[in-house]
Image (cartoon, grey):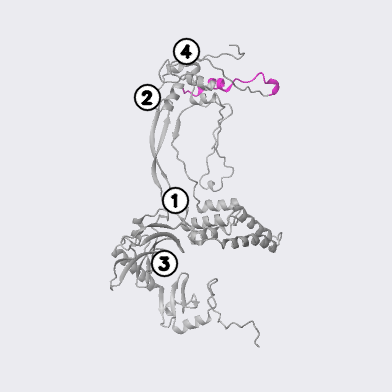
Amino acid sequence: MSSKLPTVAIIGQANVGKSSLFNRLTRTRTAIVAREAGTTRDNVVGKVSYKRRASSPEKAAISAPPPALEAVKRSRGADVSAERSRSISSGDASEKSTPAQERGAGAAYLSDDVREAATADLYFEAKGEVITFDGFLRVYGGGKDEILPKLHTGDTLETHDITARQTFARPPARYTEGSLVKKLEDLGIGRPSTYATIIDTVQTRGYVEKGDSEGQPRDVIVLSYNGEEVSRGVVQEKTGSTRGKLIPTPSGELIADFLTDHFTQIVDYDFTANVETEFDKIAAADLAKSAMLHGFYTPFHKLIEQSGDIDRSKVGANREVGIDPKSGKPILARFGRFGPMLQLGATDDEDKPRFAPLPKGAKIETVTLEQALEMFKLPRVVGQTEDGQDIKANIGRFGPYIQVGKLFVSIKPEDPHTITPEKARELYAAKLQAEAEKNIADFGDGVKVLNGRFGPYITDGTKNAKIPKDTDPKTITHEQALELLKAAPAKPARRGRTSTKSSKSPRKSSRAKK
């Protein structure tokens, strides 16, 4: 050849990967790659180019051998032949090379990793952790003395076993209470004293709820190579577990979408974090309160004014599920005051429409007509009490319940569609017993001695009075109860719930009477 570069011949046994190696080195598909021996009958010639490396510009002419040649030298420590590598890639464990074939492979004695190294350098790293302070681990005997393996640059890595495990694409992990606190810390939102309040608020208002699903099992394929053959196995893993995760409710999703569409500045993480930082500056007397409020409220007021033009009827999805076969009225899935619900009949009909909650796990976009019809079977008469009162089962704002007269009893986790009369009477009797234990004394004029959440107390419906610790609640007389109520402070009014009715007076004419 006219080129000054050296000429290298690839020699080896049949079907050991000479053509594959040639195509990889030359970055072409000149040599024919096939399972039959002797496929590439003629001599194939190609050029191999590589970049020389030198420790200094002066020694640029004297560089190390190319990665491909260096990989050939180091491949013997890997103890994996080209024939074996081909067997692994094809998934056929029956095709294994013999020691004789491996010894006769010559320059073609290469693994898949080695052939990859012909065009790219390989870097091996050892990752791990070193415990500098054992902390609570000292109580349990501490951790391992050596977590990282003792490796040095230039060490030869030998292949003992290779494991390939099937993986699946996963959505981003949902927040737990702990991970949400960590995220708030990273974003600079809230303070340690407010984290618990924030998490409690989003759950109390029904924006998120804790999941309780254990997930579903699925099969995972595992391929193992022990230096001789490839074995295939199937193991199971759980996927889709939501236990302890914060799952957004339809109400939370609707509110999040609404704020994102119309109040982008308010839901911006940086905006919230900056407000928190300004609060800290105000506390440290580094920022005037009036200046902070002016900078915050001026753009916020503009957003409020712009929101007046938003059509509230278009907020949230409204969908017609189908037609009720009995009444012929449409069944709508829509968003109501307390979240998603089902509506039987139109709002402008003469008859008042009926309402029902969505089935558990269903959404406005996915609920079916069969599911909706099942929900409108409620309330359901389960049976009668011992004194002949009807027991009705239904689903309310706070979950499933049974009703006897004006008494409501929660039946979680029972299903109102399938609860038996025996179970309903049992829950009703337990509720009556709890109510009886709650009422210690009833004097008949509205004054009662009750067992409350924080202990016994006296009430007349408007005021509550504590009972002295050295007094037995069962021994309190009517006169003593009245005295304690008289001495008790007035019950504070609930903020945001009071309204004063102003008496309307005839409007005075602005014109002066003549």
Judge whether residue 283 can be spotted in this image: no
Query: Mark 3 — residue?
Result: 348
Quick check: 270 left or right of 463?
Answer: right
Q: Secondary structure at mark 4?
A: loop
Q: CA distance from mark 2 to mark 3?
A: 75 Å
Mark 2: amino acid? Ser
Disc 1: CA contacts within 10 A as few (<14), some (14-19) or many (>=20): some
Q: Which residue is mark 2?
A: 94
| Residue 70 colored in magenta in the image | yes
Closer to us: mark 1 or mark 3? Answer: 3
Mark 2 element type: loop
- 485, above or below 156, in the image: below
- Provide the residue designation for mark 1: 242
Sequence order check: which comes first, mark 1 or mark 2?
2
Q: Inspect the magenta stretch and tell me whether residue 352 lies in it.
A: no
Disc 3, SS: loop
Quarter of the picture containing the N terminus is top right
> Which span of residues is magenta-colored?
56-80
Q: Quadrant of residue 227?
A: top left
Above or below residue 201? Residue 72 is above
What is the secondary structure assignment of the residue under circle 1?
Answer: loop
Q: Earlier in the sequence, mark 2 or mark 4?
A: 4
